[in-house]
Amino acid sequence: MSITTLNPMTANAVRTPTTLTTPTTLTLAKSITAALRQSMADDPKVVLLGEDIGALGGVFRVTDGLLAEFGANRVIDTPLAESAIIGTAVGLAYRGYRPVCEIQFDGFIYPGFDQIVSQVAKLHYRTQGAVKMPITIRVPFGGGIGAAEHHSESPEAYFTHTSGLRVIAVSNPQDAYSMLRQAISSDDPVLYFEPKRRYHVKGEVSPVLGESMEKAVIITPGTDVTLVTYGPLVPTARDAALAAADEGVSVEVIDLRSLAPVDYATLEASVRKTGRLVITHEAVRSGGIGGEIVASITERCFNYLEAAPVRVTGWDIPYPAAKLESHHLPDLDRMLAGVDRVMGR
Amino acid sequence: MVDFPAEFVQLLTPDGVRTALADYDPWVADVTGEQLAAMYEDMIVVRRIDTEATALQRQGELGLWPPLLGQEAAQIGSARSLRSDDFVFSSYRENAVAYCRGVDYTDILRVWRGSAQSGWNPFEIGMASPAIIIGAQTLHATGWAMGAKFDGSDSVAITYFGDGATSEGDVNEAMVFAASFQVPVIFFCQNNQWAISEPVGLQAHRNIADRAPGFGIPSIRVDGNDVLAVMAATRIGLDRARNGGGPTFIEAVTYRMGPHTTADDPTKYRDVAELEAWRAKDPILRLQRLLDSMGLFTPELEAKTQAKADAVAAELRAGCIGMPDPAPLTVFDNVYATPHTTLDGQRAEYADYLASFDAADGSSS
């Protein structure tokens, strides 16, 4: 299947009438459902594995209805064992399947970490290209929902640090649809991070594959400061740019979309224009995506920088109790403080 | 109190006497004297591969070698029971299994010479790239078997692992999944008594085979140094799997007569007397005695077998020493299946760096 075109008038669309065929207003969660449905309709080798994804439709209802449509051999409710969810996906990939694994919450991925890092990420390299690992691992991530421990984490840097994986994070319903379709079609393993606190954000979704999932996108154009973010903080950053504009500062907001690889071409072009870089993410600062981007942009654009780049991130702490999470998560005011710093104000 | 009942399925005693066992005899009733002689040859050859590879390591041609000495019957008896469309998910000691799958001999050494991270294309011989992470491959076998079941195929996955691996979460998760989905997979545990320096009693307070029924998986405890008993057990598991009966667990009781790898020193942790006791139960010797009692262990067989072993060893040695070192920039190959901007940049950076030496030398290579 081509990843650049999508024909809504397929036999599959008839067989599964709920497939998205025209631009439709959907929540971010339902746009993921629509992408799963279309990918499953297009390719019988696409199978879903996860906990509670069958009759319940997942704890966030993302797989709602898919068991009834595609049956238990393709929507596989698994026993509660994350390493086995990933490890059996490896075996399925060996047999020509294209598994999509759902990890129920960010903080539950660690029991599957070894299979992801030692097997999924390395098998193509290990076998000199003989064995492909077209596995997509969906991970609801991030905080801001007042949850118990292990339900609000941002573990993406563990995976961007792992060669052999592609890592993407979506911020809006259209990207959630288009980028998941691309991830499932990819012959490389993809970690797909879903911003759980934005699951209910609505937007119009067209059944297109759109821009490559590896391209960063300028959400708000600007000339004074480049503000880079991804996933759940994209709407916050957009609001911060509006607020900064009121104070006479023009902020260019970039949605990274792909965390590995990073689209440095887009970032470099922006920083050469603005001369100032702020990056914001929920994940802890040390060893995070922000540090990597600051280093890489400094290497590439040192002579263009007007000020030292600034990171506005979660603190280097375990995710705190719900009553304290607002003191951990970057919000609009902390982003503006970061913009002020880089502006020397 | 460690409780290890000694009972296991045995069809061939250490003295080479064929014993009757009604439930198992029918599964090997078709095995001819010629086939027994062929398995004898297999075992002699793989033991010779082991000896040659150990010598190559001592001579500095290999970085490391994990010998299978003593485990020949467990590996040959099971692997010779498989069909070409079955799929093996093994650990790193299953060189005799790879031999039976038809691997190019040199490919067995590729990893241990440090030339590559795997030796062969898994799809060419129906055997996955061996897992070094202990027990990880059992989940891959279970997933493959799930796919086989979805496909309506009667192919079977078999996964090899050791007694040490049975403590790993992955092995236990694999058994949960295999039982839950009733998929065609054989869990073939070679209990060789030692996980590097740790005795099996540290991993298990009861026979390992006893665990599987708790997962809802039928198990067989078999004399792993008895090629006929191993074959019977494997055929039972294969038959069950091909007919929709789900997984089987086999504990093949054997002994790692050599070190864990060439970097190991077993004299630091185990008694020589134990090794001598197991040497008396050698898997090759007992098959030789059986063939002898059948009048089949002839000078011709011995000569033919030795000639084959010599030829394989010579091919192995020549292939090892003649193996070219990979080109520097191949370090970047196949990290991803599709182009990757960051890595492509690093490849160019390193290529420029290497080329800078040529420029400085004024050399054109």
Image (cartoon, rainbow, N blue to C red):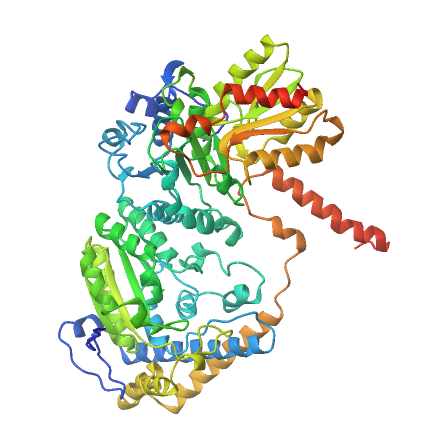
Q: Residue at x 38, y 56 (%)?
A: B137
Q: Is B222 left, or right, of B261 in this rendering?
A: left
Q: Is residue B234 visible?
A: no
Q: Is residue B269 visible?
A: yes
Give the quadrant of residue B28: bottom left
Looking at the image, residue B337 lies above or below residue A259: below
Q: Quadrant of the N terminus of chain A?
A: top left
Q: Quadrant of the C terminus of chain A?
A: top right
Q: Residue at x 52, y 45 (%)?
A: A162
Q: What percent of the width, then of the height, locates residue A199?
A: 37, 23
Q: What percent of the width, then of the height, locates residue A218?
A: 58, 20
Q: Residue at x 41, y 74 (%)?
A: B68
Q: Residue at x 35, y 82 (%)?
A: B284
Looking at the image, residue A104 lies above or below residue B96: above
Q: Is B315 left, or right, of B260 in this rendering?
A: right
Q: What percent of the width, then of the height, locates residue A339?
A: 61, 20
Q: Is B170 left, or right, of A171 in this rendering?
A: left
Q: Is A284 left, or right, of B25 in this rendering?
A: right
Foreground pick, B187 / B286: B187
